Amino acid sequence: MINKTINFKPLLKIFIFFPLIFYFGKRSYIAFDEGFYALQARWILDKGNWTIPLWWDDYVLDRTIGLQYLIAKSQDIFGRNIFSAYLPTTVAAILMLFITYKLHEEFFNKKYAIISPLILSTTYLWFDYSHLATQDVIYSCLVSIGVFSLVKIKSKNNKIYILLFGIWIGLSFMMKTFLVFVPLLSLLPYLYLKKNCLFSKFFWLGLIIGFIPYLLWSFSINSYLDKNIIFYLFDKFTILSNKNNFTNPFYYYFWNIPVTFLPWSVFAIIGTILNISESKDNKYILTFFPLICIVILSFFSTKTPYYALQISSIFSLNTYVGIRYLFNSKKYKSIFMFVTSKIIPLFLLTLTATYYFLFKNISNFNLKENTLLIIGLLFFGLSWSFIKHKNSFKEILIALIIGPYLLTSFLLQSGLFTDRSRELREEMELISSLDIVKSQPIKVDKAGMNNPQSSSKIIKISLLTPKLGEVLENIDQLKKAELAWTTDFQEIKNNNNSYEVIYDNYILKPWILILKK
């Protein structure tokens, strides 16, 4: 009986993450960025072109084909369904949680190692992007692997970890190109301490192995281009470095990270500051690495929330440090208990009541989404309200984790983070049931992609179109008995005997489905 109990514990640690990671209900994409990549992956399978990223009939040379290849290969192996499209992100998310677990063991101890990955999995930023078919969690997982392998290098005899530290760099470049230099520069203080590993042949062997996917792809794509692909990638880097639509002030991350790392932000900040006083090498990873990373990202013109994902594992570790410090602090423990057990539950109760009475009926959420959202918020507040001054550290940790765990679990199973375009999906399911739609491809009028709203809508429509045809310069190119998505209402009115409107609905606007008579 004892042995069975002991063997059950590792399984319990795995299964506890299932409600946070896996969702088996109906899914739908958002347009950017996951819809963009999913549509490119569809063209890889439709056209058999595994080399050049496409956007309708044009080449897209401002990014690698890393993520699109993974999505397409996943769908090629496991079936052309939307669940397969998310598998690369899901696998990376699981691996990132495992690496966070191992980092906790390395820096602290095994006793509460499960806490750090639980913190990470209930953080808004990580939870959000771990359910998007983008490369951000995959890239962040690779960064975490790089950090872990560097921490594990104790001497030149740690050949596997030296090799691994080389491999992650090339794979990260295939995902996010020049962004890989941000964590590398942020790790410089620690790399200086471990500089001997850089002179190891295993590091250089790992570096070569990691860059093999990129090198193979760049050689294969060059025959189609007038110059090496690296120049196109550098042009994109230059655009992002200058003022653009995603340019934000220098202080952007100083408010954005605390917001997107909720509900653990305060604990993470405290833990990050505390680790500065560490006499060990820990401070170089737990404090200097994330702080230098934030400063470098702050100097970069383009600033987005997901750039901070690469340090989210470290912030999870620092959150644990912050909670442990407040629990053991004679000066701050009473404040910590009062805020967590009184103020935050009261705030959550007020927020839930406000939403229920004022916003529930005017939101686009259905009954399932509203119910699980409200229950999740109530359970969060209820869980933290049970925190008492007399509780042990273990009991405090359990109470703190249960609230966010239940909220995020309910949010995932509600579909709010997986079925993000529910109304459009339901509409497209109706259209896909039409016999005329089942039997032939639907082409797309390129002239309608003239603004962000119509472009965003046609990405989601195209992904849900059973048979996606080619792009048209305008609907005059449409042949008899052919279908097309178009926004050209005026042309339809002027040629009312030439075209038939098959489907027109406000959810799909400005797009309508037409048939050439």
Image (cartoon, helix red, strand yellow):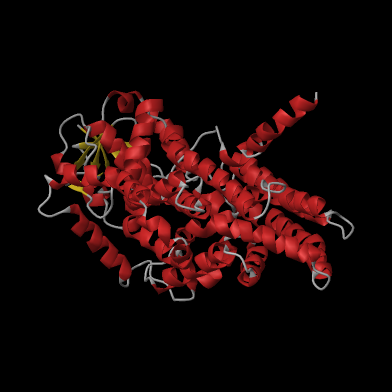
Residue at coordinates 64% horizontally, 56% vertically from top-left?
359
Q: Classify the position of the N terminus by image quarter.
A: top right
Residue 189, given in percent of the width and then of the height, sits at: 47, 68
Q: Quadrant of residue 42?
A: top left
Q: Taking 432 as reference, is 147 above or below it?
A: below
In the image, is 108 to the left or to the right of 181? right
The image shows residue 100 at horizontal and vertical percentages of: 57, 49
- Identify the residue at image location x=81%, y=60%: 341
Q: Residue at point 59% right, 62% down?
A: 282
**Who is closer to the viewer here, 96 or 424?**
96
Q: Observer-nearest residue: 329 or 200?
A: 200
**Is residue 310 visible from the viewing direction of this image?**
yes
Location of residue 22 by image quarter:
top right
Residue that extends furthest to the left in the rendered view of this protein: 226
Figure check: 300 above or below 211: below
In this picture, residue 281 sits left or right of residue 493? right
Q: Quadrant of residue 428?
A: top left
Asked whether 169 or 433 is in front, the reply is 169
Q: Of all residues shown, which one is farthest toward the bottom?
A: 250
Q: Residue 89 vs residue 64: left or right?
A: right
Q: Residue at x 46, y 60 (%)?
A: 194
Residue 182 against residue 141 in the figure, above or below? below
User: In this view of the protein, which residue sits in the foreground, 5 or 27?
Assistant: 5
Q: Position of residue 271 (x, y in %)?
A: 65, 65
Could one spot residue 512 in this view of the protein?
Answer: no
Q: How many marks?
A: 0
Q: Position of residue 488 (x, y in %)?
A: 25, 49
Considering the image in quadrants, where does the C terminus appear? top left
